[in-house]
Amino acid sequence: MQRHRQVAAAPQRRASETWEAIGQLISATLDRSPHILASDVDQAMEHASTVGRALVAAGHLDKHAVVVVADPIYLSITTVSGMAATTLDEDLGPVPGGATATDWTIYLPAPEPVTESVRAAVSGASHLSAEEPPGESTSKSAASDHENVLNLDALAQRAQERR
């Protein structure tokens, strides 16, 4: 299930506070699963904190999302800066669907000129990636959803053939 959340950045929050709010959102969402420990999520976010704060401070997350893939969740998180941040109606509550997640990856954007810094920051972290996130439609839940869609044209054609 694809979801998007926006987090207020400067001037509403400092970069470190914004990164912390993003981490709390991800942790609260994934902590609903008995297969995922909040401490593992917190550790991953702490591992990426230096580059995460830099992505926030430079405004990269205003344009490029942090993406959490934990089937059935596909969560895109961006920031909002400037005057729009002061009036943003945030929804930082846990995203529904996390209770059945078993595996998870947090994809950090790696735009120029910080590409190499992001890649270096996530190296060696099993739940962090600087690669492009998979498309939401490639997740197992999305694939099974497509299998369960009725083809009304095919049903109408079959009804015509039976007459």
Image (cartoon, rainbow, N blue to C red):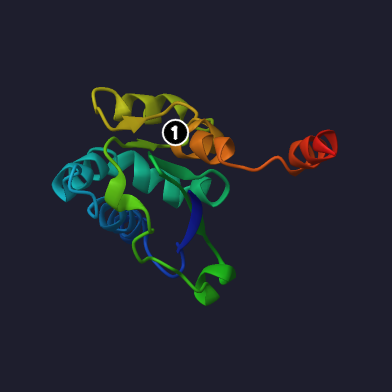
Residue at horizontal 83 percent and vertical 33 percent from the top = 161
Considering the numbered disc 1 on the image, is that residue within a helix, a strand or a loop?
helix
Nearer to the camera, 83 or 97: 97
Position in image of residue 141 (x %, y %): 45, 39
Res 64 → quadrant: top right
Q: How many marks?
A: 1
Residue 52 shown left or right of residue 3 in the figure:
left
Mark 1 neighbour density, 10 Å: few (under 14) some (14–19) many (20 or more)? few
Position in image of residue 15 (x %, y %): 37, 56
Residue at horizontal 28 percent and vertical 35 percent from the top = 103
- What kind of residue is marked 1? Lys
Residue at horizontal 54 percent and vertical 76 percent from the top = 87
Position in image of residue 134 (x %, y %): 49, 30
Residue at horizontal 52 percent and vertical 68 percent from the top = 85
Q: Residue furthest bottom?
A: 87
Position in image of residue 74 (x %, y %): 45, 44
Q: Which residue is mark 1?
A: 140
Residue 64 shown left or right of residue 7 in the figure:
right
Nearer to the camera, 163 or 129: 163
Q: Vertical placement of 138 versus 8: above or below? A: above
Q: Vertical placement of 4 versus 102: above or below? A: below
Image quadrant where one finds the C terminus: top right
Nearer to the camera, 118 or 148: 148
